[in-house]
Image: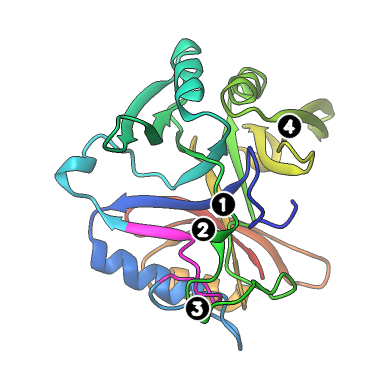
Amino acid sequence: MSDPFIPRVGGTLSADIAVPEHERELRFYSRVLTTGENPLWREDLINNLGMPIIGLGAHKAEYADLPLQWMPHIQVADVVASVERALELGGSELMHGKDDDGNSQWAVLLDPNGAAFGLIPVVSEEAIAPKEGGGARDTSARAGCIAWLDLTVSDASTTRDFYRQVIGWSVQDVAMEHAGERYADYNMLGDDGSPAAGVCHARGANLGLPVAWMIYLPVGDMAESLRRVRDEGGKVIKATQGADGEYAYAAIQDPVGACFALVPG
């Protein structure tokens, strides 16, 4: 994945979720994400560069239709056109934000599998500048971000085509093998040609993952973060370690059932 903060069609800069037990959830994420000698996140979930990457809201009445899923905000060239295409392909619209003149600013949709995602226009460079301290962003700095996102479904080929048409992603096959059978999962590429997301079959290492967009959040100390997941009432769904014993990835379920992933920062 290229620099996650570069504005581009198909890129994901942020994500949010509306949750019950908001105070408990805030404590959970604050504890889990703020590990390591130099944490990549602050306790208020702003990243270490002062950028609001993830939003954790209370599940109020106006959010009653939103599923308990992290929803990536995916940039598209034309929100209205993308919404219309999604509906034509079997998706559904949950929310649609417009300005005072009726122009679309964002939308929240469900794909045909029931996975929720947001659409926003391509953002400006100024919009993603650090909110504190001013000046240009240090592109070499380790930072809290959405390092990756992927979606696991039973029919990855049909889902691939849905997002290719709705978002404007192009596709790169990823060769896979399970139980002696070869198949392909898919990297979805942004308009700059770099991988922006993955669409995967529910088999092999992905078997048992929920049908929801999984956002990958980097942390400073994976082992400590996983310990805190358990201490704060979450679950480690699965985790992978390298030959050196270091964690490479972990799928997590938070205390109210929403899922996301942790990776080393």
Whether residues under marks 2 and 3 lie with C-beta atoms below 8 angstroms apart, the answer is no
In percent of the image, x 83 and y 67: which residue is there?
A: 243
Residue 124 tag number: 1
Whether residues under marks 4 and 3 lie with C-beta atoms below 8 angstroms apart, the answer is no
Dominant secondary structure of the residues highlighted in magenta in the image: loop
* Mark 2, residue position: 127
Residue 19 on image: x %, y %:
29, 53
Q: How is the image coloured?
A: rainbow
Residue 104 on image: x %, y %:
38, 32
Instruction: Give whichever of discs 1 and 3 has the lower sequence position.
Output: 3
Farthest-out residue, front = 101
Instruction: Identify residue type, mark 2.
Output: Ala
Q: Is residue 89 magenta?
A: no
Instruction: Give whichever of discs 4 and 3 has the lower sequence position.
Output: 3
Q: Is residue 123 above or below residue 146?
A: above
- Label 3 crowd bin: few (<14), some (14–19), many (20+), radius 10 Å: many
Residue 252 on image: x %, y %:
50, 57
Which range is magenta?
Answer: 45-56
Residue 186 tag number: 4
Instruction: Identify residue type, mark 1.
Output: Ser
Q: CA distance from mark 2 to mark 3?
A: 25 Å
